[in-house]
Image (cartoon, rainbow, N blue to C red):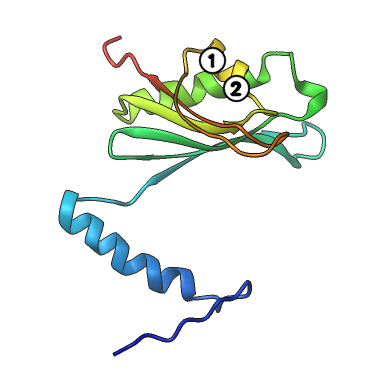
Amino acid sequence: MEPKYQLTDNPPPDAFQKMWAPLLKFNEDAVGNAIACTLAILLKEPKTDDLIGGLWARSLWGSLYIDIMFVPETLRGKGVGTSLLRQAEQEAIRRGCGTMWTETYAFQARPFYEKFGFMIFGRLDGPAPIFPRFFLKKTLDNLG
């Protein structure tokens, strides 16, 4: 049977889950538990309690992947990003992760991550100013 192809930018609400469920089963059949555990460190405005930034990550198979880290411009250079990254690292170690990794574009936070021991393990090139895109990882010290 030849499948029917549908290209869309407006898929049905359940489309992702219908594709994800069999892939998750395939992964788990191959290597065991494949469900990521979310880590969120939320920055909130003290007076209103509104969410203003933070770090969003997920741990899976011995590694913590940082999806998003955002610090409002008014808080940059004041140790907030450092605190987020250190808290995430401590939680990654607590979860038994041996590595942390993330990705960032040339115009974003590569020097910040490198300052904390992250090293480039991959790079995608393309048109400026967006590219290059860097993939960075850090080996964690789980001994202490």
Q: Amino acid at mark 1?
A: Glu
Residue assigned mark 1: 114
What is the x, y in percent for residue 75?
Answer: 77, 22
Secondary structure under badge 1?
helix
Give the tally of numbered discs: 2
Badge 2: how crowded within 10 Å, few (<14), some, or many (20+)? many
| In the displayed structure image, the side of residue 10 where residue 94 appears, left or right | left
Disc ID at residue 99: none
Residue in view at x 47 percent, y 81 percent: 5
Residue assigned mark 2: 110
Query: In whole angstroms, how far apart are the C-alphas of marks 1 and 2?
Result: 6 Å
In this picture, is 99 found above or below 11?
Answer: above
Q: CB under 8 Å between callouts 1 and 2?
A: yes
Badge 1: how crowded within 10 Å, few (<14), some, or many (20+)? some
| In the displayed structure image, the side of residue 81 where residue 23 appears, left or right | left
Q: Quadrant of the N terminus?
A: bottom left
What is the x, y in percent for residue 18?
Answer: 40, 74
Secondary structure under badge 2?
helix
Using the rendered view, name the quadrant where residue 101 is placed: top left
What is the x, y in percent for residue 105?
Answer: 62, 32
Between 123 and 115, the one nearer to me in the picture: 123
In this picture, is 36 found above or below 111?
Answer: below
Q: Amino acid at mark 2?
A: Arg
Q: Quadrant of the C terminus?
A: top left
| In the displayed structure image, the side of residue 8 where residue 139 appears, left or right | left
What is the x, y in percent for residue 103?
Answer: 53, 33
In this picture, is 26 found above or below 121?
Answer: below
Residue in view at x 34 percent, y 33 percent: 63
